[in-house]
Amino acid sequence: MRYSKLFCPTIKEVPKEAEIASHQLMLRAGLVRKISSGIYSYLPLGLRVLKKFENIVREELNKAGCQEVLFPAIIPADLWLESGRWEKYGKELLRIKDRNNKEFCFGPTHEEVVTDLIRKNIKSYKQLPLILYQIQNKFRDEIRPRFGIMRSREFGMKDAYSFHETEECLDKTYKAMIKTYCRIFERCGLNFKIVQADSGSIGGNVSAEFMVTANTGEDAIIECSSCSYTANIEAAELAAPEDSELETPVIEYSEVHTPDLKTVKQTAAFFKVSEKYFIKTLIYLADQKPVAVLIRGSDSINEIKLRKALNCEYLNLADDETVQKVTGAPAGFAGPVNLNFDMIIIADYSIKASNSFYTGANKKDYHLKNVVIKRDFKPGKYVDIRNAKESDPCSKCTDGHYRLIRGIEAGHVFQLGKKYSEAMSASFLDSSGKEKIMTMGCYGIGTGRTVAAAIEQNYDSNGIIWPLSLAPYHVDIILTNKKEPVLTSFAEKLYQLLIDENIEVIFDDRDESAGKKFKDAELIGFPVQLIIGRKLKDDGLVEMKIRSTNKVYLIPEENILKKIRQVLSNES
RNA sequence: CGGGGUGUAGCGCAGCCCGGUUAGCGCACCUGUUUUGGGAACAGGGGGUCGAUAGUUCAAAUCUAUUCACCCCGACCA
């Protein structure tokens, strides 16, 4: 490709809208452009990178026995009504109507479509297991799209679905799929972690996420310093403390006037004690019923765990009116002592491990001190409902502690079980002629997001540093001065040679200053730059610059091809 | 959905408070000349429904109301 013909509008300044490196660089390097909030176009180089990643995914999945299909982007509402997700999915589901007023949605995921296809066409255990996948754009109407391609509304995804006769078979495929995913991310040269995850609205019990580690990642992950336990903070378990009888202090609790001190932070400062000696009492509405939830002032609530502990469908923090009604005080002064309203009190394990707390008094502008569990209040039960934090003890081993890191969720695998096959009656006949419901798994990879994640992990102040497997082109020939016939004819010859040798090459033949060409090459991040300039004119040498190491090699004309081959095979 | 912010040339911004020249600057773009090793210089040039609508006024980019879009923080949600 000749750069002079290439459509690649690069930008010198950092775009105002972009916060993180990958977003800035994808815009600056002319890979993508935004057309509306959370909706992007891929430009030629961006598309080449995306296709390279998709092909890696394809190769590895095909190798693992998966078959590629392509489902429609627009899905009739009937299927979603059948699975029950038409009501449940909420506003993220983009719903549309055709001219006859028939309802459809733009697919955010395709469990319904694939299950429908399979139930109509697979009837015997002899046809199982079966794994289908597609690479397609999805649409989720995110409340707040951000970080460019990383969290957009329309986004590329590879989604695979597997169908099985038994749980054991699903488990085998699930494990094989995890191995396949590892190979995919390894081929992209990414650092990643497999973490235990919550399965969210997709459903199922067993699920794992593939997290590309990056400081700017949206997800918090914990990993144990000693054992192999890693988990998304949403799912990270905390151990129940040992049962030990704490001595009951003799001091009775007392009221303290705390005017306008509503947050734990303010109140802790007032009493000059650590926030961990406070009990934060949160009033939630679980399926419309009020619940008092107790955690330490220094902790944050994990609503996913709480929802599971309460076994409820809808969970919301109560509004001010409800708080006033059930505690008798405005928000900010709730406490577990003398809660007269009849409701469940649920406490985090960490409450149990200590004694004598500061709490709200259920009275405007008052807090209590020296509050003691059992003596002054009794939670209905103790459970794990807070978010894990740095240096919490590991729940899986005895001597480990949690470390917090951040990651980008690039892939997610689920053992779905029968959630969809049951709702949509996907059944088959087993070897004894008995009708059975299929067991399913599903496996996603965000394609665009992984490309962004690759940048997030590989850049410097000059631009992107593509891993060879994703680079839009491998070699960039930089002709520094178009007016020098010697240089031009040499560059042209070299360009032709590399094309003939099937090397992915771009030839910067633009009538631009050398400086601009260097800057663009660094920004876009071509792994190998061949500089045709002074050194060639004076000494017959080509300068080869390696983007990832910044090393420059001076190479005699006759060795160029050999050297390129050597570099390309080392880099991959 | 709540809070905050921004909409003026392709991009980044000034002008607005205190209404009154031909709406301005940098980058980008076009033409020419000179250049060509780290986003070149000079000269000339093109490009604007001042987000939209309504109002106040002799007069609106500027004041008022409404509305739309986008960004940030939070809540919500995969």
Image: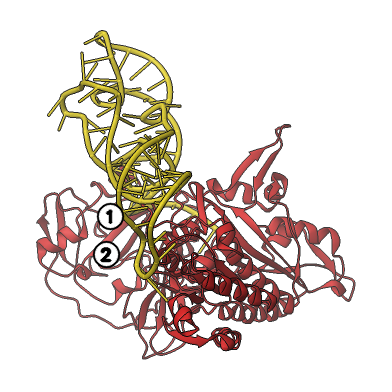
Q: Is residue A532 left or right of residue A264?
A: right
What shade does chain B have?
yellow
Q: Chain of mark 2?
A: A
- Is A116 displayed left or right of A527 in the figure? right
Q: Residue at x 66, y 58 (%)?
A: A136
Q: Subunit of mark 1?
A: A
Residue A255 image offset from top left, x and y in percent: 12, 58
Q: Amino acid at mark 1?
A: Leu
Secondary-structure class at tag 2: loop
Mark 1 in CB contact with mark 2 (< 8 angstroms): yes
Q: Quadrant of the C terminus of chain A?
A: bottom right
Q: Quadrant of residue A101?
A: top right
Can residue A165 be spotted in the picture? yes
Q: Position of residue A557 (x, y in %)?
A: 56, 85
Chain displayed in red: A
Q: Is residue A494 above or below residue B36?
A: below
Q: Please give left or right for residue A524 compared with residue A388 in the image.
A: right
Badge 2 is on which residue?
Answer: A377
